[in-house]
Amino acid sequence: MLIGIDVGGTFTDGVLFDDGRILAAVKKPTQADHLQESLLEVLDGLLAAADGKAINRIVLSTTLVTNLLVTGQGELTALLMLPGYGLPHQAYGVSRDIYFLKGAVDFRGRVIEAIDQRELQEVWQDIKQKGIKRIAVACKFSNRNHSLEQQIREFIRQNDPEMQVTISAEVSGKLNFPRRAATTYFTAMTMPEWNRFADRISQAIQARIADAEIHILKADGGTMPLEASRNQPCETVFSGPAASTMGATALSRDQQNSVVVDIGGTTTDISLLIAGQPLYASKGAQIEKHHTHINAFAVRSIALGGDSVIRCRENSIKVGPMRIGPAACFGGDEPTVTDVFNIYFKLGVGDSGRSQESLESLAASAGMDLQNLCFFVVETVIERLKRAITEMFTEWENEPAYKVWEVVHRRKFRLDRIIGIGAAAHAMVPVLAEEIGVPSFIHNYAPVANALGATVVRPTLALHLHVDTASNIYTVDPGGLKGSLESPRKFQLADAKVLALSCLEEISRQRGIDKYTVDAGFFMEEQFNMIRGWDRVGKIFEVGIQVAPGFIEEYQGVSE
């Protein structure tokens, strides 16, 4: 049996899945300040439905890291950067507390400028005076040689063993220094909180189920073991949109072009499926307007949901963006978007009488009749959603996969339908789809699709191998592996691919996901000659191999 739990902003959903069937679904209100309690409440409901049968795996999707970053609740973190030569310092505006140090590594991994110890001492004193307890260190080309980052970490630890220091070489081994620095900074900011959450949730689950695997849903729509996530908390950012995207893919399982609209209580998440496959953000997840090295879907969240409150302000009707509580038809104190759709389209959801009563009172205060009020709100909501989708298409059109589809099909991209996800999807998505001029698809399990998506996806792992035969070194991301070659002069691309697969299998074994490497495939195979004078002195190989996002073998779809 498998369990998936998605902690959303309004509700926490969970499903119990076995033998191609959803055996149970649980939905509970999310306690924003007590995510662990919300998660465990849903888990206990699912375990009761399991009736003592073995649970093999639990996958969790949580908003913890996202909330820390978007609400500005992360603890003060200093960013020490060694940018070397190139962009001006003004180009690196990641952190408020940012320091630039001497010290540089070139693209081959050679140290071409040493650290200035006096400068480092002065920076350290300033950080101490500010009371900062977390430091991120990023050096350009540290993915080729991280010795300067290690020197800085060792200096800080000698002066203050309690200081948390995160170096970029252990966060990402990819090129693009600004993105690696941003990823390291956000990782340092969230790692202690994430590990405290991991400690508590691991202990609580183990007390209930001793042998179950515990995985976390990542932003790329795959999972990673909870233990592996401890050093990569930012991989879990935007796991909510990832859950809805994979949930929509799991329910549709075809090759149509679809916009996925996940209408929750607080927000609406929008993503795109091209020929049935999720579209990725080629520049990585964007956090606080900074691109990162976190693989993620190309998604957008807007502050509009089924529980968005409707109020009268200065004789005009305002829709959202705040969520005060549930809809009036579900016992809330104020009318919401759900109440309007409930009355306008005669949905019969919850207590329709309470929807009408709350809306009539609002209409009277605005000097409107009920019909006109509902019509205005419906038009406002649909127009906002339609505008958000239109704006997203402007961004999606610049993604390589989108352009490839148009080249292959020799025509402009065509949208086939809108897939509705979330409890409010039945009310809003058909109207939205009609306005856009395409069909809508809403599965019976749409209200818990996020939890289903988390349940049935498989672990993902992308590995990048860099080989420099002239220097006789290779480096691997992730994992920070580094080694030498037995026969650098004879080393060829085929050898690099064998080495990359071997490293992928080793890291997969360490994470306990090695059974999935049989589905691994190469996504990058490049080689470059290095010339000095008139002679070739070596080669550089860049090889990428991955276990791509997808579904576990046991999942073959669910019935309506």
Image (cartoon, helix red, strand yellow):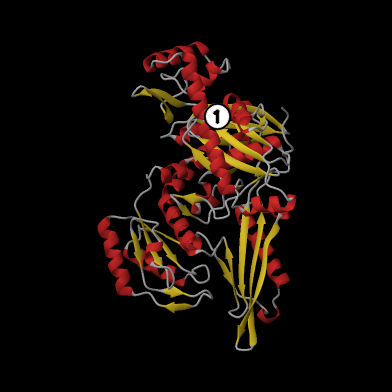
Q: Is residue 217 visible?
A: no
For the residue pair 526 and 17, the one nearer the viewer reads as: 526
For the residue pair 166 and 522, the one nearer the viewer reads as: 522
Percent x, y of residue 42: 54, 30
Q: Is residue 300 visible?
A: yes
Q: Residue at x 64, y 31 (%)?
A: 16
Quadrant for the N terminus in the image: top right
Tell me the kind of residue under disc 1: Asp
Residue 82: quadrant of the picture? bottom left
| Residue 204 to residue 153: above or below | above
Percent x, y of residue 550: 68, 46
Under circle 1, the secondary element is: helix
Percent x, y of residue 533: 60, 88
| Residue 518 to residue 538: above or below | above
Left or right side of 54 for 314: left
Residue 208: quadrant of the picture? top right
For the residue pair 357 and 113, the one nearer the viewer reads as: 357
Furthest toward the bottom, the residue is: 534
For the residue pair 243 and 22, the one nearer the viewer reads as: 243
Quadrant for the C terminus in the image: top right
How many marks overall? 1
Left or right side of 463 for 234: left
Left or right side of 552 for 386: left
Percent x, y of residue 320: 43, 29
**Dot 1 corresponds to which residue?**
44
| Residue 144 to residue 428: above or below | below
Q: Residue at x 67, y 29 (%)?
A: 443
